Image (cartoon, rainbow, N blue to C red):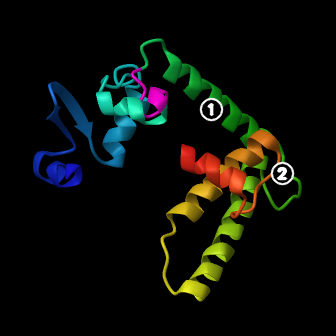
Amino acid sequence: SLTAMSERYGSVYQIQIGMRPVVVLSGSETVRQALIKQGEDFAGRPDLYTFKFINDGKSLAFSTDKAGVWRSRRKLAMSALRSFATVEGSTPEYSCALEEHVCKEGNYLVKQLTSVMEVSGSFDPFRHIVVSVANVICGMCFGRRYSHDDQELLSLVNMS
């Protein structure tokens, strides 16, 4: 619905959610402009009742950021990514540790999707992609990846 409205009203428009007016941004260039070039102006989120159900109201995307938590988490995440982008990979094949984690997990994901497709003929790739993203994060945070069937990882992914 929001995409259809953006086609009609443009990349920036306002809607009413309950009693609150909400500005909607659509399109990668518009979002980039807002979050990167004018980040301070767009840092907060509306305090909507439904947002409290998403990660108990502590999500990066849906935080009201009354105490600057979003900025602190973003700064920490950017610092970690920069670190992994400067640490060398384990072999000369990779320019950095981040590239190594992403490439290895990407290769595993392609094999996993091919295998599931051969067995089932069709499937929903959402779970496999989310687990792969979680594995890249686990690789950077914990130094290891998990099997796509690992119940502990799946329960963490499902909770968040």
Viewer-side residue, 155 vs 88:
155
Mark 1 or mark 2: which comes first in sequence? 1
User: For the residue labelled by badge 2, is the local secondary structure a helix, a strand or a loop?
Assistant: loop
Viewer-side residue, 139 vs 157:
157
Above or below for 126 versus 144: below
Which residue is found at the position 49% from the left and 27% from the top?
Answer: 58
Which residue is found at the position 39% from the left and 22% from the top?
Answer: 64
Which residue is found at the position 82% from the left and 62% from the top?
Answer: 93
Label count reads 2
Q: Position of residue 146 (x, y in %)?
A: 76, 56
Type of the residue with mark 2: Gly
Label 1, label 2: how far apart the Cα atoms are: 19 Å
Q: Position of residue 35 (x, y in %)?
A: 40, 32
Q: Which residue is mark 1?
A: 77
Magenta span of residues: 56-64
Q: Position of residue 46 (x, y in %)?
A: 30, 24
Above or below for 145 versus 44: below
